[in-house]
Image: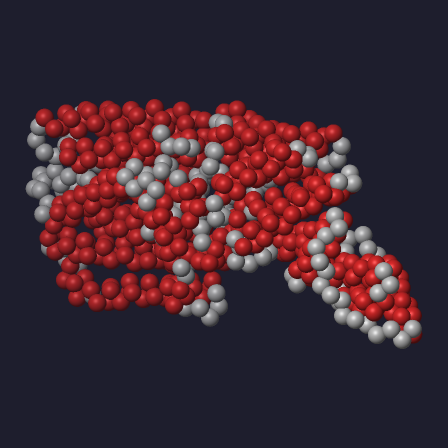
Amino acid sequence: MPAVSAIFLVAALILAVVIGPQTRPWTWGPAMLALGFAVTAALPVFWRKGRFAADFGLIAFGAITAAWFAWRAWISPVAELGEADLLLLAGAVGSFISIRAIEGNAAAERILIWGVALLLLANVVVVGKQVIDPSFTPVFRSRAAGFPSGFYAHYNEAANYLIASSLLVAAAALFGRQGVLTRVLWALIAIAGLVAVYFTRSRGGILGAAVGTGVFAVAALAIGQRQNARWFAPALIAIPIIGLAIGGFLFNGWQDSQELRRAGSGIDGIFDNNCRLYFLGVARSCIGLHPLAGGGSRSFSWESFRFADKSLQGDIATHIPEQVHNEWLQAATDYGIIGTGLLTGLLGTLAIVAVIRILFPEPSREPTSGEAWRLGGLSALAGMFVQSCFSFVFHLLPGILLLGICLGQLSRASAAPDDTSTRVFSRILLSLAALACAMLLLPMGWKGTQVTKILWPGYLSKVAATSDAARVEALTGAIRRWPRPSLYQDRAFVFQEAAAAGTGPKTREAAEQAIRDYETAELLHPYDPNPVVNRANLLSQLQRDSEAEDAFNRTIQLQGGMEPGFRGRFFLANHFLRKAVRQFGTQDPSAALASVEIAAQQIEEAVDQMHWVIADMRDARVSIHESLGTAREANGDYQGAMEAYDFAATLINGTRAHYRAGVLHGKMAASDWNARRPAEALGRFIEAKGRIGRTHELPHGVTPNQRVEYLAYLDQTIAFLKGAKIEPVKPEPLKR
């Protein structure tokens, strides 16, 4: 059974790396199914007589930690996110259980290390191809960035995988019990994997690889000295060279990575980048909301909005900060100080126990691979943990499987102790954990596999399914099997696109269906502003004003300080502008004025929350203030109208407001003339001509011929008044 467990664990890792290296939990389905079988095969191993080392204290500590995270994920405010974290937890526990079943069985260990080594080699080959051809993707149609990432979609996660796998394989190559040729091959693969980390250009990954390799070197020297290895003396002498090599790898890796990101930038640019420091500050603020128990799974993704600071956030304000980019603080945010304390204590205890067993091993009757396992687990965990301080590597299934493998290897005892009562309790705890994992992984794995098969053409395959009908059919089938808010949002977006592109009754039907899907997504994830703002825009287009305004106000409350990311106030301003235009059409200028006043207020609040104004906001801002002037003018407030036109004219692309102001001056000049104030009239006519002359873009509905005709009228009138020897008087400011 250990060999069977090893086969399925390797299969799970392969499927996780090739299909599921992303945050969509349904893509983890095939890997979870394989891991469920690995855990099931491991269960009988724990009850074989004389086969199992107890370590009851470590197992009990791990059980308490896992129980806390499982309970908090189970009661998390958003079921979808809690479910995803439960699956990740089951992945870590399941791979740990499989490793504990595999340990000590030569065939199973050989299967495991060969599987890890060959998968690592495949990734190295893909990275090499991507160095030559950055557009190459082995499975998916696209990748997140241009840097090499192997089978992964993003280079950061690829680097983390390469670090852990390379160090695990390197440990087996150095202290494994296989033949020389096999170990030499493994060593070459491990070196290639570490070199591939350099080419991912992941700065956190390069640092993690350097730290992990350093831990590997120190621990390997300790083991070599104790075993009187022939290579120990040369290695001891070479310590300065090894240190320089690791330092050079780190320095050159950072230098080249930063240069590729921004020409002329060096290592200094890394330390000038305060993006992740900003996230850490926001995370600390979130922790303060519920310090002990945390806010629940991924609570940072919605609680962080309220702490956004436009003066500090820079370009990251346009992105939804779903993760902290530091797994330790992410745990504190989501699972509280209690969860972080338990996790830190467990990892620290396992690392200390591994170091003690490396330095002071228990006597063993026969040589084992225990040294290789503890060395690989310790160095791989060190490398992964360092990078996890800069990226959310443990929120993807491959990273969490490797974490479980490392923890299983760290906890391996030097020798199986004699039978004690604690062995029974250890077996019971591991058996209960295995049953719980199998009961979660097998059904969810099957469900995820079905959804992956259904959605593959539309999401992942290189030949995408593009028709709306095919996309809707696939999403409907996926929702039937696994109703997730993200899938409802995706289907709603397809309907929304169809509504925007179509005409006639079908347009309204598609919009109504999109609204229903967005409502369902809101119910399943009530803290996500995306479905709310999309539903509000659709309601606005359907002229269901009261519902739209309620939805927009809810969006603004949800988004906190993230106007640049969700733009709720901006869309609300556009809604009130459209509403005002309709009210103008019904000859209701007072209602139109009230609407456009709100639009102007909202657009200015939106601009105030942005540290820069993007193109579509610029045009909308000009249109709103221009319309505000028109509405005030229609309601007899000429001073207010002129103020609105003057302000609009100061904005980028706002020169058309000069035309509106010029026409208003012309209208007032005509009134002065009729009131027998020719000097004031001449002054206003001259002002009108000057303002219209400053117009580079005409308002909507005004043609160039109309402008020419109006300027001709102004020239004739000014010439007539000057011919009458009238001296112009500068117009007084308009009064309300």
Q: Is residue 526 left or right of residue 414?
A: right
Q: Quadrant of the N terminus?
A: top left
What is the count of numbered marks?
0
Q: Is residue 58 left or right of residue 185?
A: left
* Residue closer to the observer: 683 or 702: 683
- The image position of residue 169, as x and y in percent, is 29, 48
Q: Quadrant of the C terminus?
A: bottom right
Q: Is residue 425 left or right of residue 379?
A: left
Q: Is residue 359 above or below residue 36?
A: below
- The image position of residue 674, as x and y in percent, is 87, 59
* Residue closer to the observer: 586 or 319: 586
Q: Is residue 586 left or right of residue 352?
A: right
Q: Is residue 77 above or below residue 115?
A: above
Q: Is residue 91 above or below residue 134?
A: above
Asked if residue 695 can be seen in this view, the reply is yes
Looking at the picture, the colour scheme in use is secondary structure
Query: Residue 503 appears in which quarter of the rendering?
Result: top right
Q: Please name the residue shown 57% across and 46% down the image.
A: 569
- The image position of residue 209, as x and y in percent, is 32, 55
Q: Please name the residue shown 87% across and 69% down the image.
A: 718
Asked if residue 41 can be seen in this view, the reply is no
Q: Please name the residue shown 80% across and 59% down the image.
A: 668
Q: Please name the residue shown 36% across and 45% down the image.
A: 286
- The image position of residue 173, as x and y in percent, is 25, 50
* Residue closer to the observer: 330 or 733: 733
